[in-house]
Amino acid sequence: MSIVTRFAPSPTGFLHIGGTRTALFNWLFAKNMGGKFLLRIEDTDRERSTQEAVNAIFSGLRWLGLDWDGEAVFQFSRAPKHREVVNELLENGNAYYCYCSQEELAAMRDQAKAAGLAPRYNGYWRDRDSKQAPAGVKPVVRLKAPTEGKTVLEDLVQGTVVTCNTQLDDMILLRSDGTPTYMLSVVVDDHDMNVTHVIRGDDHLTNTFRQIQIYQALGWQIPKFGHIPLIHGPDGAKMSKRHGAVGVEAYKALGILPQTLCNYLLRLGWAHGDDEIIPTEKAVEWFNIEGIGRSPSRFDMNKLLNLNSHYLRQAENDKLIDSIAEFLPNNLSAKLSDSADYRQRLVIGINGLKQRAKTLAELATGAQFYLLDAPLPMNDKIKLLLSERESREILKKLTEALKVFNEWNEASLHILVKDFSNGLGIGLGNVAKVARAALTGSEISPSIFEIMQALGKQETLNRLKRCGQLVF
């Protein structure tokens, strides 16, 4: 059997982090099994569905590398096929027209509540002849669901789950305006797309029992279902906006790498021994449904950031430099793009910078001093340090020592500055502190010797000399 999975989001907002994990699990399972991963846009809610949301789904999945097979299917365009299936159910006696008014349905719900039962439709039109229908009423079409026995789900994640059929009423398949309902559309689309495995959140568990009954009424093969626990926030509640960013685009905007997000979401509810760092190629090789847990996972932003720092350190430098461009001010991004000299500074200096950053945004902020021209922006503390007479003397003498020095590499510069410090009778740390302030405008940076090498001899001398002469 060829494995076919699908991801079926509704385009009514951003690509939610929970939905993204669902897409990831389906994608990994299909890739692991040599099958297909399909994308279906469930856009039947015409009032809330937007093209902007569709674009966000497409761009989010592509950014994460979750490529789908074939063209995306838009559910709304398949409405004629959905209605055709309803007619088939009417013909074989597994569906019927219901002419109840909203007032009658409300009365049924109230009656059920008064009897201590769940509010539900009581099957009033189930066995009545349509000839008894009131004039001028457009009916809905309901499934003639089984009223006895149980519906059993052998869930790939949850195990055996059973519901009594008395708990499920005759659901609506076709509304009075002729539009198909979600329950019907999903079943027809999954069948026509040859979906073999439906992996989705456990908030769909009740829906699954209803959908199984539609499959049975049509005599279609039922796909295998796996319902994964939802992602919770740090407080144990269902992940929502109050916990912070919940859309993929927000994490991209924060400077999280796509491979980081995939790795982190994979580990939220799936395990492979004690492995925490799982690159995509290993995830494809190792993924199985048996590794999915039954308990909700808690989203931890600190863990995500720590994982991102790992992937930043492992990233190829050229790709990393390209990635930070969108996090830089426009003028600095242009320099990086247009000038080989400015880019070369980052090629040399990026190793030191990426050891300290947790996001691309932080990395871009840390890299700005390489792309800025004098005078560098400085806070009052740095200005005070560089205004001291001792600091200016250090910078003037260091500039003179570096003028005649030609072995411009990190190791040689370290030796020179160390000898220079010893010659002045002051600690290397004190010299480095002043030099760092002059070269970067900051108190914190990578090694000043790496910075000197990256800036090059002339720019290093220019920055040291200028600060040595300034009176703040």
Image (cartoon, rainbow, N blue to C red):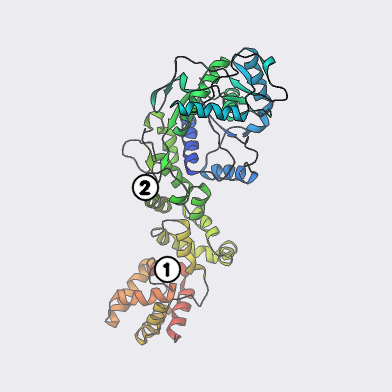
Q: State the image coordinates of residue 407 (x, y, percent, origin top left).
A: 40, 71
Between 402 and 427, which is closer to the camera in this rendering?
Answer: 427
Q: Is residue 359 rendered to the left or right of residue 130? A: left
* Callout 1 secondary element: helix
Sequence-wise first label, 1 or 2: 2
Give the residue at the far top of this rendering: 92
Q: Amino acid at mark 2?
A: Asp
Residue 444 vertical placement versus 43 (above, below): below
**Gap between marks 1 and 2 measured at Cα:** 43 Å
Residue 404 visible in the snapshot = no
Q: Position of residue 242 (x, y in %)?
A: 45, 51
Looking at the picture, tell me which residue is in the foreground, 31 or 142: 142
Image-quadrant location for residue 186: top right
**Residue placed under numbered mark 1 in the picture:** 451
Q: Nearer the viewer, mark 1 or mark 2?
A: 2
Residues at marks 1 and 2 touching, judged by CB atoms closer than 8 Å:
no
Residue at coordinates 61% horizontally, 32% vertically from top-left? 70
Q: Quadrant of the C terminus?
A: bottom left
Quarter of the rendering containing residue 76 = top right
Q: Residues within 10 Å of mark 1 (few under 14, many from 20)?
A: many
Marking on residue 235: 2
Q: Between 367 and 229, which is closer to the camera in this rendering?
A: 229
Q: Residue visible at 57% across and 45% down?
A: 13
| Residue under the image location 39 percent in, 82 percent down | 384
